Image (cartoon, rainbow, N blue to C red):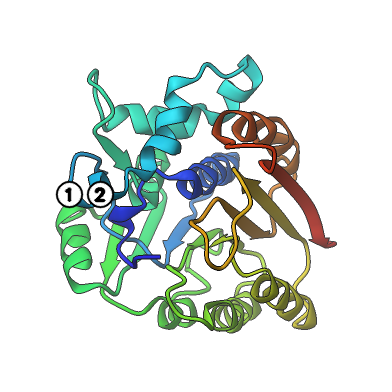
Amino acid sequence: MNYRHAYHAGNIGDVLKHAVLARLIVYLQRKDRPFRIIDTHAGIGTYDLTSEETQKTGEWQKGIGKVLASEPPVEVAEILKPWLDVVHSVNGEGKLTAYPGSPTLARKLMRSIDRLTLTELHPKDFQTLADLFAGDHQVKTIHLDAWLAMGSFVPPKEKRGLAIIDPAFEVTDEFNRMGKAVVKAWKRWSSGVFAIWYPLKDRWGLAAFHAALEDAGVRDVLALELNTGRSGPDTPMLGSGMTIINPPFTLAGEMEIVLPWLTEILGEGADANWKMKQIIPE
């Protein structure tokens, strides 16, 4: 996978990631106290779907493009509304030409009392991100490696909040590095919500990652999958998953409603499926 997310903006992975992220933010808003969102691989914030990068792959057409072209059942529409409202807000009344990445989605859903910390390592992408949020006192942008950020910024002073973690998986030991960083951060902030995204191309690495969480004593872990087909190490990404530590009690029920519908509209054959499992109990 190419490190720069512009090539993949709005794809099937973003559909799962951002549908879940929006629900996590909505849940945090149930209490009056402020919270902080930490986005470890922030990218540039908002993506131009007419750009050379996005046009080169066209991945958004099989992701957010299909979602917006479909008419979801009422229950599904209600759950997806916070996310899709933000998608519509960056496009105005016109056709789909822009896609909000995690930073823009989080910023538009936050309240005035909440805060957002964004880290990005790619120099050009960081500058674009910093320019986007320049002067915004609720957002802090930092040019820093994600795994260093995980050890430096938790627990936040607000005590409440979530970390969204979605590496590019360009290196072969990414699951191992991610496991060490997440465990270290969880030990410092065991009450935080950790939402971790990954492509479903390395099942052995994923199993080892989950085992590392359990061996470290992490509790209450939910795993989600959305597969549009059968992907492997040598195929395009046809599926992605999320592991959520300390998921809201409402999330599993919401995903039981949303994931079957997303599988139906995004699926590309008989191998399309979704899965959800509490892999580590509370």
Q: Nearer the viewer, residue 69 or 145?
A: 69
Residue type, numbered disc 1:
Glu
Q: Residue at x 17, y 49 (%)?
A: 52
Instruction: Give the labeled residue for mark 2.
Output: 56
Residue 177 circle label: none
Q: Is residue 196 visible?
A: no
Figure quadrant of residue 94 = top left
Q: Are marks 2 and 1 in contact (CB under 8 Å)?
A: yes
Q: Residue at x 49, y 44 (%)?
A: 12
Position above or below: 223 against 142: above
How crowded pointer 2 is (Cα within 10 Å; few <14, some 14-19, many 20+) is rated as: few
Quadrant the C terminus occupies = bottom right
Position above or below: 267 against 168: above
Position above or below: 125 against 110: below
Name the spot of residue 116 as percent of width and height, x first: 38, 57
Q: Residue at x 46, y 47 (%)?
A: 14
Name the spot of residue 236 as percent of width and height, x first: 48, 56
Residue type, numbered disc 2:
Lys
Instruction: Give the labeled residue for mark 1.
Output: 52
Name the spot of residue 159 as percent of width and height, x first: 55, 64
101 left or right, relative to 123: right
Q: Is residue 222 visible?
A: yes
* Label 1 element class: helix
How crowded pointer 1 is (Cα within 10 Å; few <14, some 14-19, many 20+) is rated as: few
